[in-house]
């Protein structure tokens, strides 16, 4: 128990940044310095310095990524589908302008090419300047990873025009609303499914498991209307306020069938190292859902443990 009489005082500096998960629940992070603030053609873009999270990116007032906790999110979003695929070579990221998902994908030596489609040039520019600890230079315009192609375009339109196929499609999107809203739809999921190579896997983040059950149910039901296998999984992400739902969708691959030992073997064979969150035990653990999440999922057509 903390002795309140001797507890250190919280420094009153900077300003508190709030994000609401529902009408009655919000959480805050103390910004010690505003590094950049711009209005792009699509959204408000901010980078803040903070004691608890390091530099952090906000879009339209929502927390997107931070230096200190990005591995919870990016490693889970990327390595669960990447390790579930036998040998991914070509991958597409829709969104992901901070570069964190691309950096994780490119750790796999099987990857020949990653295409990153980000609608907002401002997000790319500001991430290149301020968020190097997240992307480690892979998205740099000069000197970035040569396996990465960056395209500034609307993800829906890009896929409509493209005939390319992918082993992995990673939807690294903002929450529904604004330019990302059409990407949370059965129509977009069908388009993604048509661009997946045989054995291909799509992954995305969905919603707060605790506060946004209606969004969780809707998204999983839309995915299950398109894909034979939809596997939701649960990740704790500090910047997102706690337990957060993600999912993989595929016509042939179920990530829950990948054993912990197989995960370790694939990571080793592909030369993936330096991970801070993901491993074989975590792969299996995140598939196990608490009862209240099972109750939400069971009507959607998605699979669950």
Image (cartoon, rainbow, N blue to C red):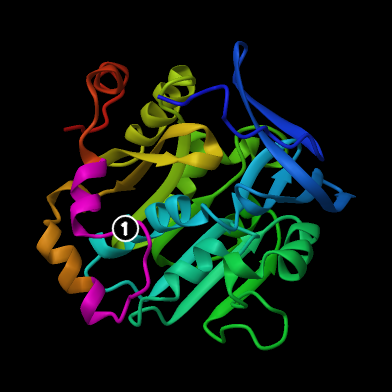
Describe residue 295's horizontal placement relative to residue 169 as left or right: left
> Which residue is farthest top?
24
Assess whether residue 112 is covered by the magenta stretch.
Answer: no
How many tags in the picture? 1
- Report the residue at 47% width, 78% height from top: 113
Q: Report x, y in % for residue 168.
A: 39, 62
Q: Is residue 36 above or below residue 44?
A: below
- Image coordinates for residue 115, horizontal then vertical, percent: 55, 70
Q: Is residue 283 left or right of residue 96?
A: left
On the image, the x and y values in percent for residue 172 come to: 54, 51
11 is higher (above) or lower (below) than 203: above
**Does the segment drawn in magenta span residue 279?**
yes
The residue stretch that appears in magenta = 267-286
- The picture places residue 197, in percent across and down from the top left corner, at 34, 64
Nearer to me, 165 or 301 = 301
Q: Left or right of 75: which side holds 127?
A: right
The residue that disc 1 covers is 278
């Amino acid at each position: 128990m903390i002795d309140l009489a001797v507890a250190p005082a919280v420094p009153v500096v900077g300003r508190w940044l709030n994000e609401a998960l529902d009408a009655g629940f919000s959480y805050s992070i103390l910004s010690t310095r505003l590094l950049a603030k711009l209005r792009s053609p699509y959204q408000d873009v901010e980078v803040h310095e903070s004691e608890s999270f390091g530099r952090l990116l906000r879009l339209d007032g929502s927390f997107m990524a931070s230096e200190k906790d990005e591995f919870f999110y990016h490693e889970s979003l990327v390595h669960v589908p990447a390790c579930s695929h036998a040998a991914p070579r070509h991958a597409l990221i829709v969104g992901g302008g901070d570069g964190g998902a691309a950096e994780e994908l490119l750790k796999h030596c099987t990857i020949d090419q990653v295409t990153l489609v980000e609608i907002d040039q401002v997000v790319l520019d500001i991430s290149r300047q301020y968020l190097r600890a997240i992307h480690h230079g892979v998205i740099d315009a000069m000197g970035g990873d040569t396996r990465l192609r960056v395209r500034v375009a609307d993800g829906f339109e890009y896929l409509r025009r493209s005939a390319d196929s992918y082993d992995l499609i990673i939807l690294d999107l903002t929450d529904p609303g604004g330019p990302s809203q059409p990407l949370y739809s059965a129509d977009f999921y069908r388009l993604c499914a048509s661009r997946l190579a045989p054995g291909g896997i799509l992954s995305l983040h969905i919603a707060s498991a605790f506060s946004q059950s209606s969004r969780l149910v809707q998204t999983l039901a839309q995915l299950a209307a398109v894909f034979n296998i939809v596997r939701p999984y649960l990740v704790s992400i500090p910047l997102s306020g706690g337990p957060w739902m993600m999912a993989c969708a595929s016509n042939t691959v179920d990530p829950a069938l990948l054993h912990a030992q197989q995960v370790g073997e694939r990571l080793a064979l592909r030369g993936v190292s330096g991970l801070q969150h993901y491993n074989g035990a975590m792969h299996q653990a995140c598939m196990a859902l608490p009862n209240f999440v099972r109750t939400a999922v069971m009507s959607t057509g998605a699979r669950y443990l």
